[in-house]
Image (cartoon, rainbow, N blue to C red):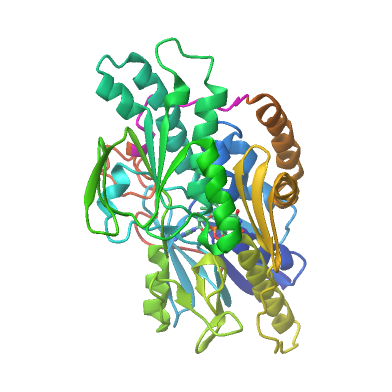
Amino acid sequence: MNEQGSQRRVVIVGGGFAGLFAARVLRRAPVRVTLIDRRPHHLFQPLLYQCSTGILSEGKIAVPLRDLLRKHKNADFVLAEVTGIDTDGRRVLATRPLGDQLEFGYDYLIVAAGVQQSYFGHDEFAQWAPGMKTIEHALIIRRRVFGAFELADTAVDPAERSRWLTFALVGAGPTGVELAGQIREVATKTLRAEYRHIKPEDARVLLFDGGDAPLAPFGPELSAKAARTLDKLGVEQHMHSIVTDIDATGLSVRAQDGTVTRHEAGTVLWTAGVAAPPVAAAIAAATGAKQDRAGRIMVGDDCTIPDHPEIFVTGDVMSLNKFPGVCEVAMQAGIYAGKRIKHEVAGKMPTKPFRYHDLGSAAYLSRGRAVVSVGRVHLSGFLAWVIWLFIHISFLTGFRNRLGALVSWWPAFVRDVRRERTYTTEQVGLVHSAYDVLPPSAAGPAPSATGTEPSSRAG
Ligand SMILES: Cc1cc2nc3c(=O)[nH]c(=O)nc-3n(C[C@H](O)[C@H](O)[C@H](O)COP(=O)(O)OP(=O)(O)OC[C@H]3O[C@@H](n4cnc5c(N)ncnc54)[C@H](O)[C@@H]3O)c2cc1C
């Protein structure tokens, strides 16, 4: 057997923060790494809202995984959706775009599949209220936000015009707050001088949340400051509000006293709630792992599934000690899993459990205003905004993107210019996923010689 053939096989499911950082740690280890992702890029989710509101292009917040792995001589990238695992045969089962089945043998498995948007049992809301998790979402939101002003401009009926100028956001966490502030800034600054039949600054932004205050996880002090900043921006905050229905022309909301109010809104965006992707349930079923209420896989303090020391679960899809779903947890867990494998392969038995070092959190409110919470230090206003800028620049993956982001931020922050406002008038959201199995006539070229028989890779 040649050296490569004798090396242990590590399969990583997901090229987000957890998966990518695990692959980086394993770069020089004597293992063969296969990173499988259903998308071709690593995405910097914290700046999705800037992509959807015209500040950054999609290429500035997403980098091809092949590009990121090009110097990893021991790593291969595969574009496919993992559907399950066979623990006895140690095989990962996947579907490639257009529907063929693939298999990958593993000695170690790192599950880093992240989470997806949850509509709390109302998946039917998704067709009217896109979430904010992927590039597809950001581009749909960009089209809906900028498209709404166009439809308002040509609307003859005042009620219709007012509907298109009303934007409703569900969820007052960081993403909802950031999007709400951005839409008001688009309306009051960027678009202000561009329309002749409407006043873009008349746009109403309604923010709904079932909790007491926006940005609740930042603590009462920063949360109150965020609420004041949103007020000044003109965002109408509706706390203690549960959304009961969404349709093509608006939403219905139940207040604390039980009254239900209908709000007409041309654009409804959903930023509340997350759930583990379907692959988490498949892996839990195959391994006997428990899942928490959001479907995340519960792991031991070494990030492995009980009785499966070869299967690590990292990042947002991992349920451990109520760690938050943030980049830092994902990166640190990915690094931990990678190091543990590296040590085991070298014949050292690692014993240290995973420890999360909390470096704090930050949220952008508007140009020049942010909130930052690091341990006991709570900051808001301009200083917090500068820290926010520094954090995001240092975490953006890839030098070109850092430089590109700085170049795009300059006109946006100094002159309110948003250069990335291009959108298509096609219904991007209705285009089918590459993993949907379509009738042969619609699916394009005939399937490969393997047909739907699984083909084996990496082992
Ligand atoms: C809008 C938004 C704003 C955010 N802002 C912040 C912030 O300011 N600060 C912060 O710390 N965190 C923030 N977060 C959270 C942060 O982005 C996540 O915690 C982090 O991305 C988690 O990394 P991960 O690797 O676990 O998952 P992800 O980054 O989500 O990566 C998971 C990968 O797995 C792939 N995948 C999923 N299922 C499969 C499958 N079946 N087969 C193959 N591949 C699969 C996906 O395509 C994806 O590439 C934000 C998140 C969002 C959505």
In this orientation, which residue lies closer to the viewer: 352 or 168?
168
Residue at the far top in the pictured view: 196
Q: Residue at x 70, y 68 (%)?
A: 376
* Residue at x 32%, y 25% (from the top left corner): 162
Q: Is residue 415 above or below residue 194?
A: below
User: Is there any visible trace of residue 125 in the rendered image?
Assistant: yes
Quadrant containing the C terminus is bottom right
Towards the viewer: 228 or 136: 228
Report the magenta residues as a range. 417-429
> Image quarter for residue 353?
bottom right
Q: Is residue 422 magenta?
A: yes
Magenta stretch: helix, strand or loop mostly: loop
Residue 56: x percent and y percent?
61, 35
Q: Is residue 446 left or right of residue 115?
A: left
Q: Is 224 located above or below residue 410 in the figure?
A: below
Please state the horizontal and vertical placement of residue 220, each as a whole percent of the image: 56, 62
Q: Quadrant of the N terminus?
A: bottom right
Q: Nearer the viewer, residue 130 or 424?
A: 130
Q: Residue at image x 63%, y 26%?
A: 416
Q: Nearer the viewer, residue 139 or 233?
A: 233
Please state the horizontal and vertical placement of residue 24, each as a whole percent of the image. 71, 62
Q: Regarding ligand 1, which quadrant of the image does it lie in?
A: bottom right
Magenta stretch encompasses residue 394: no
Residue 421 appearing in the image? no
- Note whether 87 is above or below 375 in the view shown: below
To which quarter of the image does residue 302 belong?
A: bottom right
Query: How many numbered discs?
Result: 0
**From the viewer's perspective, is 354 left or right of 128?**
right
**Residue 226 x/y as whole percent:** 56, 50
